[in-house]
Image (cartoon, rainbow, N blue to C red):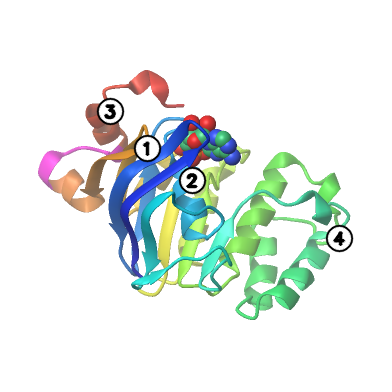
């Protein structure tokens, strides 16, 4: 699935989240969406998921405009709704299986074991980090053409982040899925990214092919980000 932003502006009242922005995400690649707080990363993901519509310009998937009805081709990792607090982890997996025909219950159970989650625990009794793990289980168990991960590692113990990030790779459908990860945890995901965009003040300030950046400029993504934005203090 090719996702294209063409001259997109999104305003929330007087606040401009995206300002006449054009960029593209290609099929089968993993993208990092980087930038300071409030730069428009979450808004970008919400627009692909059809949860927020542009004031100007178009967001398309394979040339078709994204509509408010969340496209079935998109899995969007977001906060778990209060509605689910009384569900157990296993109950949540059953619920997702009933809601999404593309949901792979076998993979979800594997991921629950990989993430060392207790399937019988209620969501309201999970720690923040374990809620984060459950959200990843749910997002990675969908067989969608687009996978959107908004701060997927927030709340995760830094000791296990690395293992989890590496483990994620085995659950991403390479060549088929377009994966977009909005994050400040650049060090952790650097190894899995194909490309990255820097977004700041609602505008694209940089785009790189990660391997090329390493080979031709000898820069890590974090170094490139710092060089491009010259605003290290803004990053976590
Ligand atoms: N529902 C909303 N109502 C009003 N303003 C909003 C809303 N959502 C986002 N904004 C504003 O739009 C701008 C972009 O926000 P967005 O959440 O997309 O940024 P972000 O890059 O994801 O930030 P962070 O890294 O802090 O999560 C910010 O100025 C934010 O305050």
Mark 3 is surrounded, within 10 Å at the Cα level, by few (under 14), some (14 to 19) or many (20 or more) other residues, namely: some
Relative to the observer, which residue lies in front, 215 or 41?
41
Mark 2 is surrounded, within 10 Å at the Cα level, by few (under 14), some (14 to 19) or many (20 or more) other residues, namely: many
**Label located before the other in sequence (4 or 2):** 2
**Label located before the other in sequence (1 or 4):** 4
Q: State the residue position of label 2.
A: 43
Q: Is residue 228 above or below residue 141?
A: above
Quadrant where the image shows the N terminus: bottom left
The numbered disc on residue 131 is none
Q: Is residue 226 above or below residue 104?
A: above
Q: Is mark 3 within 8 Å of ligand 1?
A: no
Numbered disc in front, either 3 or 1: 1
Kindly identify the residue that appears in the image at 31 percent across and 44 percent down: 20
Kindly identify the residue that appears in the image at 26 percent across and 23 percent down: 230
Q: State the residue position of label 1.
A: 202
Asked if the magenta segment contains residue 208, the reply would be no
* Bounds of the magenta segment: 216-221
Residue 184 visible in the shown view: no
Mark 3–mark 1 CB contact (< 8 Å):
no
Q: CA distance from mark 3 to mark 4?
A: 46 Å
Q: Position of residue 58 (x, y in %)?
A: 37, 59
Asked if the magenta segment contains residue 219, the reply would be yes
Give the structural element (helix, strand or loop) at label 3.
helix
Mark 2–mark 1 CB contact (< 8 Å):
yes
Residue 9 visible in the shown view: yes
Q: Is mark 2 within 8 Å of ligand 1?
A: yes
Q: Is mark 1 within 8 Å of ligand 1?
A: yes
Kindly identify the residue that appears in the image at 55 percent across and 44 percent down: 153
Q: State the residue position of label 4.
A: 120
């Amino acid at each position: 699935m090719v996702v294209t932003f063409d001259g997109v502006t999104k305003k929330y009242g007087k606040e401009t989240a995206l300002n006449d922005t054009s960029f593209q995400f290609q099929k089968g690649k993993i993208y990092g969406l980087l930038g300071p707080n409030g730069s428009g990363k979450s808004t970008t993901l919400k627009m692909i998921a059809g949860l927020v519509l542009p004031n100007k310009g178009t967001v398309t998937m394979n040339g078709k405009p994204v509509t408010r009805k969340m496209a079935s081709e998109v899995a969007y990792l977001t906060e778990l709704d209060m509605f689910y607090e009384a569900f157990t982890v296993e109950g949540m997996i059953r619920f997702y299986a009933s809601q999404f025909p593309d949901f792979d219950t076998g993979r979800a159970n594997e991921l629950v074991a990989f993430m060392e989650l207790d399937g019988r625990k209620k969501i309201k009794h999970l720690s923040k980090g374990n809620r984060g793990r459950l959200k990843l289980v749910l997002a990675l168990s969908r067989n969608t053409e687009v996978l959107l991960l908004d701060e997927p590692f927030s709340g995760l113990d830094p000791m296990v982040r690395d293992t989890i990030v590496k483990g994620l790779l085995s659950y991403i459908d390479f060549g088929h899925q377009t994966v977009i990860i909005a994050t400040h945890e650049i060090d952790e995901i650097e190894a899995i990214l194909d490309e990255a965009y820097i977004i700041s003040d609602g505008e694209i300030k940089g785009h790189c092919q990660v391997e090329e950046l390493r080979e031709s400029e000898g820069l890590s993504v974090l170094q490139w980000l710092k060089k491009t934005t010259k605003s290290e203090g803004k990053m976590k």
